[in-house]
Image: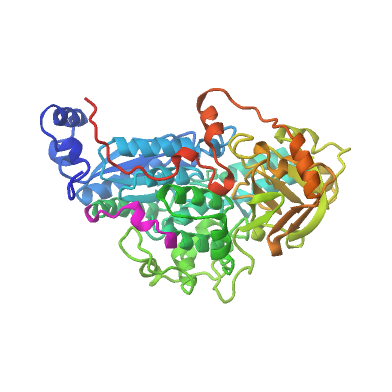
């Protein structure tokens, strides 16, 4: 492509047959040629779907983006990609994240667009879209759909994290089915994604702290009129970004990734953040490893008092000043000069911001909790690492030694967990195998497995739980996740037996199986995979190519960026 020439001109600016074809069918949409010819053509990548309730308001949001694009002299083209709804998709939306990223990448590259607006909401829609766009690297801006309004139940504020509490109360006979129905109606009472600091809010905050969205993008509720204003302004801004040729790779530097890691610690973001950030870094070509999370976030305390690590909701975070007010507290440690999509630095974006509620956003000198972030564990049980979110755990269990109660897979767990004969007490360590990327397949959010009913009845509310799966960002407990290598590929997790002693030592970043190296090797020599390998379709591709959690669970062949050039024409 010639320098200075708009990418879309390779379609609409052509003479002869090719230009005829590229333009003629655009005209059937009732558009006069001056609308799109020679103007920055902006794709709006829309994950709207009624099967993704968190993103069901995105057609309206797209209208606001379009208005902004028109106002700035660009031409919007909205296109759908596969949408990922966390609540309805089986066996887990994570199975399809890489598929969507391929859909996004190829849709952008194959079509006449000069820049892209990514409409992201429910958990996986954000990483999938950012990953795909990173592999093309055009000027790109993210508009998130925004969180739901805070849920209300019996005079109390509730959100997704309460589901886990309600479920345990229901199982222990302390909450009736009628009350459960009332709670579910009161919880999701507006458009938007989960209102706690779950994965969707974590991802929206990640995008903002990376500099990929306008300031305030993360926290404005979906139902707040200012969400549409932000969408409109983002539409205006992307047109300018195309003129400035400001690409994703100009924003997504190693320093920007470090900023996102620090912000994630301060907000108490989801453990899923680690996996998705690693995958995005792999696409844009930034070297990022599990060690970076530990190194960068080690000294950052928890500032934001939101569920599941605290008490409040995203709506409260917005009213308290949002992510800009959080970033301002991190001034002393952030890479303040990082460029963001609006052409300003991180520091310029937060400088004029204020915090309006110190209950919700604490100061760096008087943090909400000294413990924060996602801690990376190492040891013979997880040679390539595992993660735990200490702010959502029980402090007393962060140093723990206990006997393993092993479940070979999710069916085994469901079958036996409430068996009165199960040999388990509050000091036991629940171990769940074969819920990793390849094993399940798709690495579902089952890592915060429920506690045995007989212990719930005794008043036990938390236990150490270990698996190669993930946990919902809304979940909590002393839960070790993302064990790599996973059981299904022959990791040590696969040879743990009930009765083995496991040591969790979060202070020293250790997860150890107290079994001799010799014994481990003997067991591994006898170990056979029990995983069902699927022979056709997408799941076949997934199982062949998915990498382990410490590599972001991306496909091996998707690492890197192929750019935006396509040399051949379609006719
Ligand atoms: Fe969509 Fe929680 S279910 S964000
Ligand atoms: Mg989730």
Q: With respect to residue 216, does 162 lie above or below?
A: above
Q: With respect to residue 170, does 152 lie above or below?
A: below
Q: Is residue 485 visible?
A: yes
Residue at the (54%, 32%) spot, across then down: 544
- Quadrant of the frame with the C terminus: top left
Q: Is residue 107 left or right of residue 114?
A: right
Residue at the (21%, 41%) spot, across then down: 8
- Quadrant of the frame with the N terminus: top left
Which of these two is toward me, 557 or 253? 557
82 drawn magenta: no
Q: Is residue 83 visible?
A: no
Tell which residue pokes out farthest to the top in this image. 536
Q: With respect to residue 49, does 492 lie above or below?
A: below
Residue at the (51%, 24%) spot, across then down: 537
Which of these two is toward me, 215 or 499? 499
Q: Quadrant of ligand 1?
A: top right
Q: In the rendered image, which quarter is residue 293 located in?
A: bottom right
Q: Is residue 130 left or right of residue 116?
A: right
Residue at the (19%, 31%) spot, across then down: 22
What is the count of numbered marks?
Answer: 0
Q: Is residue 500 left or right of residue 379?
A: right
Instruction: Report the coloring of the rendering.
Output: rainbow
The x and y percentages for residue 284 are 40, 50
Q: Which residues are magenta?
A: 243-256
């Amino acid at each position: 492509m010639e320098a200075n020439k708009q990418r879309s001109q390779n379609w609409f600016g052509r003479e002869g047959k090719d230009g005829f074809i590229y333009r003629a069918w655009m005209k059937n949409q009732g558009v006069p040629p001056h609308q799109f010819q020679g103007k920055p053509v902006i794709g709006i990548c829309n994950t709207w779907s009624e099967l993704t309730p968190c993103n069901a308001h995105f057609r309206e949001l797209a209208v606001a983006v379009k208005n902004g694009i028109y106002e700035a002299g660009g031409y919007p083209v909205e296109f759908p990609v596969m949408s990922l709804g966390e609540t309805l998709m089986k066996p887990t939306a994570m199975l399809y994240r890489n598929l969507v990223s391929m859909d996004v990448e190829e849709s952008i590259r194959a079509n006449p667009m000069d820049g892209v607006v990514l409409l992201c909401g429910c958990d996986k829609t954000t990483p999938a879209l950012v990953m795909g766009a990173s592999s093309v690297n055009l000027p790109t801006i993210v508009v998130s759909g925004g969180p739901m309004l805070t849920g209300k139940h019996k005079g109390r504020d509730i959100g997704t994290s309460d589901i886990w509490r309600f479920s345990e109360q229901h199982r222990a006979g302390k909450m009736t089915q009628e009350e459960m129905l009332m709670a579910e109606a009161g919880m999701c009472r507006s458009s938007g994604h989960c209102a706690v600091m779950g994965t969707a809010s974590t991802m929206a905050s990640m995008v903002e702290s990376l500099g990929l969205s306008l300031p305030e993008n993360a926290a404005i509720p979906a139902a707040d009129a200012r969400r549409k204003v932000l969408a409109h302004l983002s539409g205006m801004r992307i047109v300018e970004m195309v003129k400035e040729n400001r690409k994703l790779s100009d924003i997504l530097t190693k320093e920007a990734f470090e900023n996102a890691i620090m912000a994630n610690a301060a907000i108490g973001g989801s453990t899923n953040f680690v996996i998705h950030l690693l995958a995005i870094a792999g696409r844009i070509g930034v070297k990022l490893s599990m060690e970076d999370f530990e190194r960068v976030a080690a000294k950052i305390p928890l500032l934001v008092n939101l569920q599941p690590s605290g008490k409040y909701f995203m709506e409260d975070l917005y009213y308290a000043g949002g992510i800009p007010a959080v970033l301002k507290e991190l001034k002393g440690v952030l890479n303040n000069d990082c460029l963001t999509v609006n052409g300003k630095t991180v520091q310029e974006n937060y400088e004029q911001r204020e915090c309006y509620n110190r209950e919700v956003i604490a100061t760096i000198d008087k943090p909400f909790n000294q413990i924060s972030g996602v801690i990376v564990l190492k040891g013979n049980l997880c040679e390539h690492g595992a993660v735990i979110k200490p702010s959502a755990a029980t402090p007393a269990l962060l140093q723990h030694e206990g006997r393993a109660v092993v479940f070979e897979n999710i069916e085994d767990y469901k079958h036996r967990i409430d068996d009165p004969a199960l040999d388990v007490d509050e000091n036991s360590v629940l171990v769940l195998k074969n819920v990793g990327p390849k094993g399940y397949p798709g690495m579902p959010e089952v890592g915060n497995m429920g506690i045995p009913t007989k212990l719930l009845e005794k008043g036990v509310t938390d236990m150490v739980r270990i698996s190669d799966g993930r946990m919902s960002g809304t979940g909590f407990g002393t839960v070790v996740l993302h064990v790599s290598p996973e059981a299904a590929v022959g990791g040590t997790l696969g040879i743990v037996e009930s009765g083995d002693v496991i040591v969790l030592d979060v202070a020293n970043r250790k997860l150890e199986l107290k079994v001799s190296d010799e014994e481990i090797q003997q067991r591994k020599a006898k170990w056979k995979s029990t995983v069902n390998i699927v022979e056709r379709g997408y799941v076949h591709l997934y199982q062949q190519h998915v990498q382990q959690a410490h590599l972001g669970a991306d496909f091996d062949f998707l690492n890197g960026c192929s750019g935006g050039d396509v040399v051949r024409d379609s006719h």
